[in-house]
Amino acid sequence: MEIRSPQFKNNAREALVDENLQSALGKMRTGFTSKRAEARARLPEFDDLRDQARDIKDHTLAHLDLYYEAYEEKVTAAGGHVHWARTAGDARDIILQICQDENAKLVTKGKSMIAEEVALNDHLEEAGMEVAETDLGEYIIQLRQEPPSHIIAPAVHLTRSQVEKSFRKSHTHLADDRNLDEVSSLVNEARQVLRQKYIDADVGITGANFLIAETGTSIIVTNEGNGDLTQTLPRVHIVLTSLEKMVPTLEDVSTILRVLARSATGQEFSTYTTLSTGPRREDDPDGPEEYHVVVLDNGRSAMIGSEFQDMLRCIRCGACINHCPVYHAIGGHSYGWVYPGPMGSVLTPTLVGIDKAGHLPNASTFCGRCEAVCPMRIPLPKMMRHWREREFERHLTPKLSRTALGFWAFLAKRPALYHLSNSVLVRLLRVLAFGRGAIGSLPLASGWTRHRDLPAPERNTFQELWRSGGYE
Amino acid sequence: MTASPKVGLFITCLADLFRPSVGFAAVKLMRDAGCTVEVPRAQTCCGQPAYNSGDRKDTRAIAEQVIAAFEDFDYVVAPSGSCTGMISKHYPELFEEGSQWRLRAEALSAKTHELVSFLVDVLKIDHVEAQFDGTVTYHDSCSGLRELGIKQQPRQLLGSVKGLTLQEMEEAEICCGFGGTFCVKYSDISNEMVSHKTECIGAANADTLLAGDLGCLLNMAGKLKRQGSNVQVRHVAEVLAGMTDLPPIGEEH
Ligand code: SF4
């Protein structure tokens, strides 16, 4: 996927005037947040569970090698295969090879952000295969040839009528006069179209929300049940996942699942929680004959032990995105790559480089709402600040900001000089206000005055007034 | 606690420059509550502009300056959740664990409070003697709310102001889009955020908007002014101290 993060400001500017997008975002602004708040209120131990979930992941990350050893043993014993992909390219090649060995023509896919990360679809399509997304949101954006704009609701940037339009354009075999006014009729139509694909597919690819070391199991949670059909009907099931999905035991995963859906959509539990362990056994009524797990690193192992390690606790619930006022303003595509919102602002620079994704950790007010709702207690603002520190150290901060900051810091470290310059500044601003209470335009602060007035200083600085014996 | 706790007022760079009356309101509130208040001259800013720009070195230098200027007081109080959060939550993290500066930063952190929370949580004040005829709505600034847990304290004290009606706005806890340098670096996004905020403020039908942080107040006042709104904007301390004779933020003096 092309990285459009360097054009973040432009992307955002366009998003702000996109009426469809703004209307779609307006709906999600309060929906997800109120549902999470209600779910949390119904579970008194919710915050305790968050602590436990955090501890489980911290523990796992500290012993990741051991857990992967145990995991691989279990998977192999069950007749499955574990593949290690150091880079996105490795993951693509491994999967392509499996598909080619199978002579695959049609590949069905459940929702997988890792597949987006490695741009899997393009790779398989270039090799002549048809890839059918089976998650409704993913299916919609596949029709529209767009990237996802949200990690759990990939088509959240679209209005119902945009989806209707795409369906009419693509599903030309269906009657023109059919009624698609209701969301449910859209869902039914997608089901209908996808049904045959499940049956015809040679390979089914899903992601994994968790891998369990104790049993060699991979887990997906979905609301549509599409993942189950994707992974049980074709002859080959490939799980594409990333390093940090490991959890030691079934018991641990149950704890984390209790905060996952509640944080994501406000559900107590997702509709489907599906566990897969190896291929179909002899007496199993169904299931794939081959079971592969592709574990992607792509820079993640380098995060262990760094100031970004906490990010590896992320369970991709999307709560930070759902609660982010910046995301609400500009939507997911503005971030320019696979992962949007606060989690993306921390993760994307790790995966594509801070030189390309530099805007992301800067485009935050540090309002802290993401950290306040993150079920894994990931200190997202703190890590965005760490990225800013790296940028500052590497002189990637824009020159003008850096010079201005240097000048300001010079004064801030010299109180006497600082007070003097503030006294001058107050007078200057008051002159520029021409006796009015606010300044409408200020050349050096146009970022401010383009959109709002600058309230003029009241009169002298507090320090001046205080030293001269008080206010009156 | 000593009979008259000695408080160092951390005025904050924005109040110093734009709204000295917030400082005087803070002084009045604390004196009325029996405190002795001093204002060290060796203070400038808490260092957030450097900290949030990734400039650790300057942040540390500024933090050391603040620590040295304030560590002899019984309490340090700032009329801002954001600057208080910087001193109490972030200063210790700037220094290596176990180092001398870390210990000094932690000691300062423990006695640093946001003004309204200081009055309510530390001094146990449950009412103020003030009069304000009007309907106000209150914006919860992010750092105060989420770093320091300030939510009910200002509402409790506002409830004791004679003549005042509090009308809550929708989404009072959502960021106004200020974010320090964010509002100039990403001014279009910030504009969208503050516009959403002023919509909520308008819908609350209050005649005055209050908050506890001058950054947010200047941002919201500037936007309201640009939109031609009649809503007046003040720091909550001005109302609690009964110092509302002077024009609101952004109005002619
Ligand atoms: S960072 Fe936290 S809130 Fe955001 S997606 Fe990951 S787990 Fe969920």
Image (tube, helix red, strand yellow):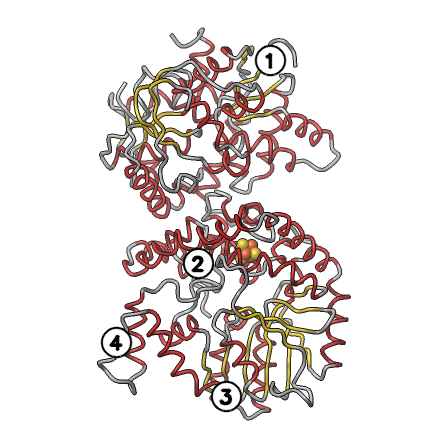
| Residue under the image location 38 percent in, 28 percent down | B210
Which residue is denoted by mark 4 in the rendering? Answer: A179
Instruction: Give amino acid for label 3.
Output: Ala
Instruction: Mark 3 and mark 1 in contact? Answer it, CB < 8 Å.
Output: no
Indicate the chain on which mark 4 is placed.
A
Tell me where residue A342 appears, x and y as whole percent: 50, 53
Instruction: Mark 4 and mark 1 in contact? Answer it, CB < 8 Å.
Output: no
Instruction: Give amino acid for label 1.
Output: Lys
Both marks 4 and 1 on one chain: no
Q: Confirm or reject: label 4 Cβ below 8 Å from ligand 1.
A: no
Frontmost of labels 4 and 2 is: 4
Indicate the chain on which mark 1 is placed.
B
Query: Within the image, what quadrant is residue A161 found in?
Result: bottom left
Marks 2 and 1 sit apart, C-alpha to C-alpha, by 49 Å
Is residue A120 or residue A324 the one in the foreground? Answer: A324
| Residue under the image location 66 percent in, 69 percent down | A211
Tell me where residue A377 appears, x and y as whole percent: 60, 49
SS assignment at label 2: helix
| Residue under the image location 60 percent in, 13 percent down | B6
Taking B84 as reference, is A162 left or right? left
Q: Quadrant of the C terminus of chain B?
A: top left
Taking B93 as reference, is B187 left or right? left
Is residue A225 or residue B50 the one in the foreground? Answer: A225
SS assignment at label 3: loop
Query: Within the image, what quadrant is residue B245 found in?
Result: top left
Is residue A409 or residue A370 the one in the foreground? Answer: A370
Frontmost of labels 4 and 1 is: 4
Marks 4 and 2 sit apart, C-alpha to C-alpha, by 35 Å
User: Can you say whether A267 is above or below B65 in the image?
Assistant: below
Which residue is denoted by mark 2 in the rendering? Answer: A335
Frontmost of labels 4 and 3 is: 4
Frontmost of labels 2 and 3 is: 3
